[in-house]
Each structure stands twice: as structure tokens, then as C-alpha cells.
Image: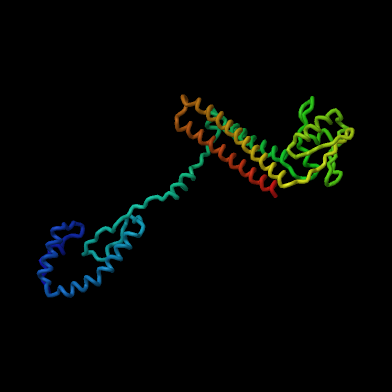
């Protein structure tokens, strides 16, 4: 049995660190004492070195896992355990962009900020912009060859603005001809013809007394693309109105900075911006659906 001069290191407590000088002294003493065993040790070194390198690589590449407060008892209590290598995981550009897009949503109770602004009124004004866009799409961008296609055409008279179906009786004479009977309000016949010509439905009405004949034009690809351009114009107009509502609301909120804290003002502004973003998404959805309908 070999007598190693490093007995004090072997019996050293595992929590006490071992300095590099002591390790070198131990290696030198082992080389002098174990000279006859050197060929065996060299062979073991060549055999065990690849396995040791592979083990270290697995430890470095493995993700950092948080350990519990109560650790399991060591399997070999008399051996010194060194901590495994730790690596720092950096966020990629893709994950940063995803986290940036997923901002926290705000849901403020409108009753708590009534002295600053009425959030219900702001939301109602923004919703009204969306509803007006839907009405514009239905009234001006229809390619259906049915009497209902003329119902929402607005006629401007001396007494005000009225839908065409309230001034005259609309009927389908044939698949290519729509008749409008203006006998109930003959004085509005001229205004009704003007409204039909000014609509975006590419109509060319003809008058026969109190009867307005509206030939249904053949829907061409060019006409469909023209209607799509008009739909984009309507949606851009709606977004402009939406921005005005948001800007007016934010201006009103900023006037309360002297009374309320910056955090409160910032939260209210964020809530208004969230309302605006949601309506803008709905506007884009309405435009996409209308474009699909028009192009067929």
C-alpha cells in the first residue's frame, strides 16, 4: 500500500477550499511516490480524458435549473464537490420582439376617473366611427342587383335628408332594371335622380313622369377594383376620425396633470390608446371583408 504525503488534504473538510499550491505539491509527491505506476496512470489518462471532457461539455450546455432550498444528501460525503459551470442565457431578437408586442392590457374602472374624463363617452365616440364606416360600406359599395341595393341612398331635399326607400317605392322590374315610383313625393324626383347619379354604384337613371328607371350595369372587374379603392378611402377617412377622437381625449386628460399623479394620467392615456387600437383593428377587418366581397 502506498503512503501518500497528502493525508491532511484527504481528511480536510469538504467545505474548506484547496489552494493551487497544495494541489501542485500533491501532484509532485504523487509523481515521486508512484513512479512504478506511471505507465498505468498514463494509460488511464488517455482512456478517461475523453469521457471527462464529454461530461464537462454536457454540464456547460445544459440549461441552468434552479435547485430547491432543501438539497439531497451527498452520495459521497468524503469527496470534495465543485460547482458545475453556469451559463447565462441571453434573449434573442425574436423573443424581444414578441415580448415588445405583447404589452400589458389596461382595464380601468371608468367610475374611478370620471373627474378626469368619461371613458365610456370616448369609447362610444370611437365605436360610432366604426359604425359610420359600416354604413358607408353598405350604402355606397354594393354590387347586389336587388331593390335593397338602393335603400340606403340618401336624397337631399328642401325638408332635409331622407333614404330613397322612404320617398319612393322601389321594385325590381327585371334582373337588369330597377323601378322607383316617386308618386308619393313627386317634388323629390329631381333630387332622387341626382342622388342616384352621385352614388358610387355607377348608375345612370332615366325619368318617365314620376317613375325613375334605373338600369343595372354589368359588374365588370374594373368596376369592382374601383369600389375597392373607394373602400380604402372610406377606411382611411374613418381612421382619421378615430385619431381625432383619441387626440381630443388625450388633450383633455393632460389638463388634469396638476390634480392627479403622473402614473394615473399615464394609465388613462394608455386606456384611451388601447380603445383606439382595438377600433383600428376592427376597421382593418371591415376593409378586408369588404375587399373580399367586392373582388369576389
Of residues 120 and 226, the one drawn nearer to the viewer in this rendering: 226
Where is residue 9? Give x, y as percent. 14, 62
Where is residue 175? Give x, y as percent. 83, 47
Where is residue 288? Give x, y as percent. 63, 45
Left or right position of 267 against 190: left
Q: Which residue is located at x 21 percent, y 74 percent?
A: 43
Q: Which residue is located at x 17 percent, y 58 percent?
A: 18
Q: Which residue is located at x 45 percent, y 50 percent?
A: 94
Of residues 123 and 94, the one drawn nearer to the viewer in this rendering: 94
How many numbered marks, from 0 up?
A: 0
Q: Quadrant of residue 5?
A: bottom left
Q: Quadrant of the N terminus?
A: bottom left
Left or right position of 150 against 6: right
Of residues 28 and 266, the one drawn nearer to the viewer in this rendering: 28
Q: Quadrant of residue 192?
A: top right
Where is residue 131? Give x, y as percent. 66, 37
Left or right position of 17 against 201: left
In this view, 293 is above or below 258: below
Q: Which residue is located at x 22 percent, y 64 percent?
A: 79
Q: Quadrant of residue 31?
A: bottom left
Amino acid at each position: 500500500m502506498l503512503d501518500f504525503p497528502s493525508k491532511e488534504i484527504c481528511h480536510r473538510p469538504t467545505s474548506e477550499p484547496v489552494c493551487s499550491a497544495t494541489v501542485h505539491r500533491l501532484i509532485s509527491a504523487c509523481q515521486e511516490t508512484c513512479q512504478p505506476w506511471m505507465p498505468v496512470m498514463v494509460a488511464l489518462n488517455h482512456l478517461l480524458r475523453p469521457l471527462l471532457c464529454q461530461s464537462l461539455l454536457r454540464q456547460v450546455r445544459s440549461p441552468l435549473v434552479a435547485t430547491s432550498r432543501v438539497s439531497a444528501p451527498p452520495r459521497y460525503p468524503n469527496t470534495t464537490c465543485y460547482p458545475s459551470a453556469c451559463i447565462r442565457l441571453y434573449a434573442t431578437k425574436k423573443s424581444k420582439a414578441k415580448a415588445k408586442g405583447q404589452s400589458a392590457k389596461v382595464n380601468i374602472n371608468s367610475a374611478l376617473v370620471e373627474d378626469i374624463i368619461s371613458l365610456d363617452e370616448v369609447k362610444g365616440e370611437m365605436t360610432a366611427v366604426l359604425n359610420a364606416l359600416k354604413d358607408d360600406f353598405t350604402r355606397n359599395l354594393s354590387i347586389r342587383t336587388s331593390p335593397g341595393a338602393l335603400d340606403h341612398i340618401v336624397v337631399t331635399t328642401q325638408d332635409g335628408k331622407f333614404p330613397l326607400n322612404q320617398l319612393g317605392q322601389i321594385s325590381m322590374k327585371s334582373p337588369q332594371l330597377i323601378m322607383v315610383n316617386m308618386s308619393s313625393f313627386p317634388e323629390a324626383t329631381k333630387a332622387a335622380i341626382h342622388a342616384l347619379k352621385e352614388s358610387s354604384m355607377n348608375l345612370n337613371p332615366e325619368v318617365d313622369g314620376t317613375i325613375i328607371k334605373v338600369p343595372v350595369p354589368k359588374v365588370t372587374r374594373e368596376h369592382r377594383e374601383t369600389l375597392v379603392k373607394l373602400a380604402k378611402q372610406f377606411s382611411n377617412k374613418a381612421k382619421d376620425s378615430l385619431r381625432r377622437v383619441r387626440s381630443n381625449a388625450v388633450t383633455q386628460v393632460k389638463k388634469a396633470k396638476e390634480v392627479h399623479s403622473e402614473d394615473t394620467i399615464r394609465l388613462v392615456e394608455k386606456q384611451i390608446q388601447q380603445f383606439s387600437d382595438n377600433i383600428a383593428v376592427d376597421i382593418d377587418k371591415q376593409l378586408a371583408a369588404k375587399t373580399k366581397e367586392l373582388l369576389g
